[in-house]
Image: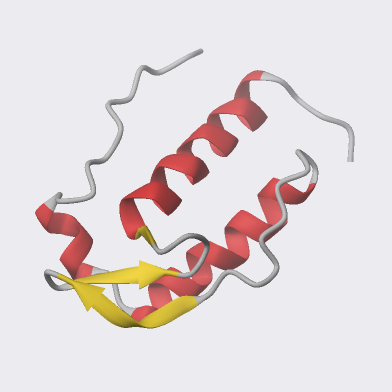
Amino acid sequence: MTVNRTPIAPDDPRMRDYTHAQITALLTELHTRGTRFGIAWGSATTLGGTVDGRILIDFGNAPVATLLNLLHLLRDTERNEPWES
């Protein structure tokens, strides 16, 4: 079943609620899920800086919304097309 999702906007107020620890856990999930698809940002980490109260992630200074949107796509792909491990 495919669920149509509206991408999360970088300026979504919910993005201010994420902590460095939560984002680090999301980056770990990205590394785990992305590997089988050739997505490898081994150096991705949280930066010390923020923009308007939102933590930046160091893979092109992306906002947390970019990370969440990418994880949604990976999760949807895994659900819709089972891959062999």
Residue occupying the point 27% across, 26% down: 6
Q: Give the image location of residue 61, x and y in percent.
A: 41, 64
In the displayed orientation, state which residue is furthest to the front. 60
In the displayed orientation, state which residue is furthest to the right. 85
Residue 35 located left or right of residue 62: right
Q: Give whichever of 5, 62 is nearer the camera.
A: 62
Q: Quadrant of residue 21?
A: bottom left
Residue occupying the point 69% across, 47% down: 34
Residue 22 located left or right of residue 78: left
Q: Give the answer, above or below, for where 73 lies relative to 14.
A: above
Q: Give whichever of 83, 59 is nearer the camera.
A: 59
Q: Give the image location of residue 83, x and y in percent.
A: 81, 29
Residue 2 located left or right of residue 51: right
Q: Give the image location of residue 63, x and y in percent.
A: 33, 58
Q: Give whichever of 75, 52 is nearer the camera.
A: 52
In the displayed orientation, state which residue is furthest to the top. 1
Q: Give the answer, above or below, for where 77 lies relative to 72.
A: above
Residue occupying the point 62% across, 27% down: 77
Q: Looking at the image, how many numbered discs can be counted on the residues?
A: 0
Q: Quadrant of the C terminus?
A: top right
Colouring of the image? secondary structure
Residue occupying the point 33% across, 25% down: 5
Q: Give the image location of residue 30, x and y in percent.
A: 60, 55
Q: Give the answer, above or below, for where 73 lies relative to 54.
A: above
